[in-house]
């Protein structure tokens, strides 16, 4: 049977366009001044917890006594606000991160500043009804602030943040802003603590369980201490510690300019996907797009870079999170001020930007959200009860302040991938010893599009238009390709079909 690839691709592009996600509901948290929704976690039963900050002292934030107050809230999966907790105890507090415990409580970490003292780690536990179960502070004479936490199976909590101290509850100091890692028991008592870093500044983003220990994902500007391979002004830093915080190894990723981490997830098919931001144009950064880009990196199970992609436009594009879909694709989100490159539409000076990429990092669809004014994007999280997702951001109000906004998107969002729709083809010879390559399909078809060859880091080595009909097509690739693994990509009417090619010399 003869199949028209042109027709197949045209139909699929139409399906993808229709299936872009739409908002189902939104919740606005507002007072008379500026309020922000900054992070989201979702329970297994579908309840949404979020944290934020507020300069309002009225409306949803009545009781706030601080110039910038901290708050947490719970919203049902239908979009009904169940409670909002405004921290009004007279201290200056900020919430750096939230997570859910195994028994359904909400663990919050951040910083608390008592008059006359620098800020300390602040850790608190709320029950599902928003009532405070306990809160503790830890630190030294200088400033501390916690930013991420992990609830452990034994009921304990692992907390990471930054610290300038060398005394009090902190025993070591390497210089600058250290990563300070502490374990607390189920009542908030300190079990152990350790410091990570070098003479520059370190800042943690995430704690990930890994082989009887933990991975700490963060950013570093050091080139000494625990940092064994500095790359530039600041690097994405991944450090492995054992169960009591002893450093086992570390990795640095990026280029010679500014790179910083956002999030890392373990892929369902093995390895990891790392999301960061980069202003670099060298070393591991191969195709820069602009001032600051989303930087998406696939890491092997041994944390070696398999491929990387820069996503964005010519201005500043700042990522905030990602998750893997049930269709083995990935939803990314953040903030953009670009109106070119990968960004098709700019609604104002700063928009939220959502996109779906396949397992090679190629964009399947993208969209901006926002108003003609400044919109600030903060967080994305998948639903646990359907195939939608939530975003936390701000929207400008009529008085030139911001309101906090929680939006539910989907389902559905596009789940089509090239494996679902592309005609099967093979490459011969593979491995390739020379430059002549044959592309063979399992049944005759008509192809009208282009052919690309790029390596696993996204560097393009060959691109050419192609039109042919039948079972087989031959191309001549550049001579003296470096040995290694490549991707042959067939593109037509917006659909990308890919096969891996090994070049052997």
Image (cartoon, rainbow, N blue to C red):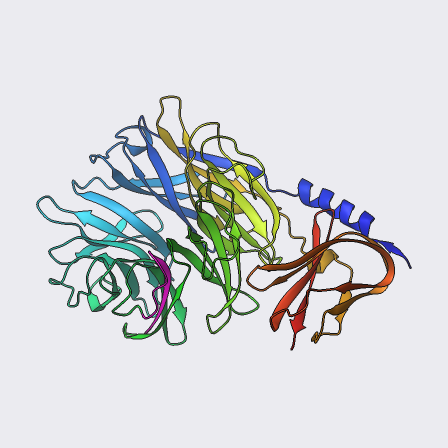
Tell me residue 85's x, y (percent).
30, 41
- Relative placement, left or right, of 193 versus 203 is left
**From the viewer's perspective, is residue 432 above or below residue 488?**
below
Asked if residue 235 is among those painted magenta in the image, a careful observer would answer yes
- Relative placement, left or right, of 168 versus 174 is left
- Relative placement, left or right, of 493 versus 2 is left
Q: Quadrant of the N terminus?
A: bottom right
Q: Residue furthest right?
A: 1
Q: Residue furthest left?
A: 116
Asked if residue 415 is among those painted magenta in the image, a careful observer would answer no
Q: Which residues make up the magenta segment?
A: 228-242
Tell me residue 444's x, y (percent).
88, 61
**From the viewer's perspective, is residue 334 above or below residue 229?**
above
Q: Residue furthest top?
A: 398
Q: Is any atom of residue 79 visible in this view?
A: no
Q: Is any atom of residue 161 visible in this view?
A: yes
Q: Quadrant of residue 394?
A: top left
Residue at the image point whose x is 33% and y is 52% from the top: 97
Q: Quadrant of the C terminus?
A: bottom right
Q: Number of marks in the image?
A: 0
Q: Residue furthest front?
A: 479
Tell me residue 342's x, y (percent).
57, 44
Residue at the image point whose x is 46% and y is 40% from the top: 315
- Relative placement, left or right, of 106 versus 303 is left
**From the viewer's perspective, is residue 496 above or below residue 238?**
above
Q: Quadrant of residue 463?
A: bottom right
The one of 320 and 69 positioned closer to us in this rendering: 320
């Amino acid at each position: 049977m003869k199949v028209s690839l042109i027709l197949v691709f045209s139909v699929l592009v139409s399906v993808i366009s229709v299936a872009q996600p739409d908002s189902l509901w939104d919740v606005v948290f507002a007072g008379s001044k500026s309020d922000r929704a900054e992070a989201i976690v979702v329970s297994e039963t579908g309840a949404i917890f979020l944290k934020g900050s507020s300069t309002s002292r009225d409306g949803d934030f009545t009781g706030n006594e601080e110039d910038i107050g901290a708050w947490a809230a719970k919203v049902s999966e239908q979009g009904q606000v169940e409670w909002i907790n405004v921290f009004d105890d007279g201290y200056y507090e900020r919430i750096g991160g939230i997570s859910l415990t195994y028994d359904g409580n909400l663990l919050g970490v951040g910083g608390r500043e008592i008059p006359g003292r620098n800020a300390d780690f602040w850790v608190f536990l709320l029950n599902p009804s928003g009532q405070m179960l306990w809160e503790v502070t830890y630190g030294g004479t200088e400033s501390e602030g916690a930013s991420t936490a992990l609830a452990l199976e034994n009921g304990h909590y692992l907390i990471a943040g930054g610290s300038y101290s060398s005394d009090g509850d902190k025993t070591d100091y390497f210089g600058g802003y250290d990563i300070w890692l502490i374990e607390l028991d189920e009542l908030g008592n300190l079990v152990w603590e350790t410091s990570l870093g070098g003479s520059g500044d370190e800042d943690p983003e995430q704690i990930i369980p890994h082989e009887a220990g933990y991975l700490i994902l963060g950013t570093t500007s050091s080139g000494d201490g625990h940092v064994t391979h500095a790359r530039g002004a600041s690097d994405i830093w991944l450090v492995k510690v054992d169960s009591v915080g002893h450093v086992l190894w570390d990795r640095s990723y990026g280029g010679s300019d500014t790179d910083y981490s956002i999030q890392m997830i373990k892929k369902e098919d093995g390895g990891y996907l790392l999301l960061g931001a980069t202003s670099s144009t060298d070393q591991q950064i191969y195709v820069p797009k602009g001032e600051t880009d989303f930087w998406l990196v696939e890491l092997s199970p041994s944390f070696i870079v398999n491929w990387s992609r820069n996503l964005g436009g010519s201005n500043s594009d700042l990522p905030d999170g990602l998750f893997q879909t049930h269709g083995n694709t990935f939803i990314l989100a953040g903030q953009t001020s670009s109106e070119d490159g990968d960004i098709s539409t700019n609604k104002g000076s700063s928009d939220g930007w959502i996109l779906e990429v396949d397992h090679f990092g190629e964009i399947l669809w993208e969209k901006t959200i926002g108003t003609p004014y400044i919109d600030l994007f903060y967080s994305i999280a998948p639903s646990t009860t359907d195939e939608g997702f939530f975003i936390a951001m701000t929207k400008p109000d009529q008085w030139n302040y911001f309101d906090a906004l929680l939006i539910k998107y989907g389902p559905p969002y596009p789940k089509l991938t090239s494996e679902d729709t592309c005609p099967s083809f093979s490459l011969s010879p593979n491995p390739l010893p020379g430059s002549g390559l044959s592309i063979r399909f399992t049944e005759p078809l008509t192809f009208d599009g282009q052919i690309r060859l790029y390596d696993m880091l996204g560097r393009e080595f060959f691109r050419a238009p192609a039109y042919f009909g039948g079972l087989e097509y031959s191309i001549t690739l550049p001579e003296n390709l470096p040995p290694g693994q490549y991707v042959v990509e067939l593109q037509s009417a917006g659909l990308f079909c890919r096969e891996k090619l090994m070049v052997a010399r």
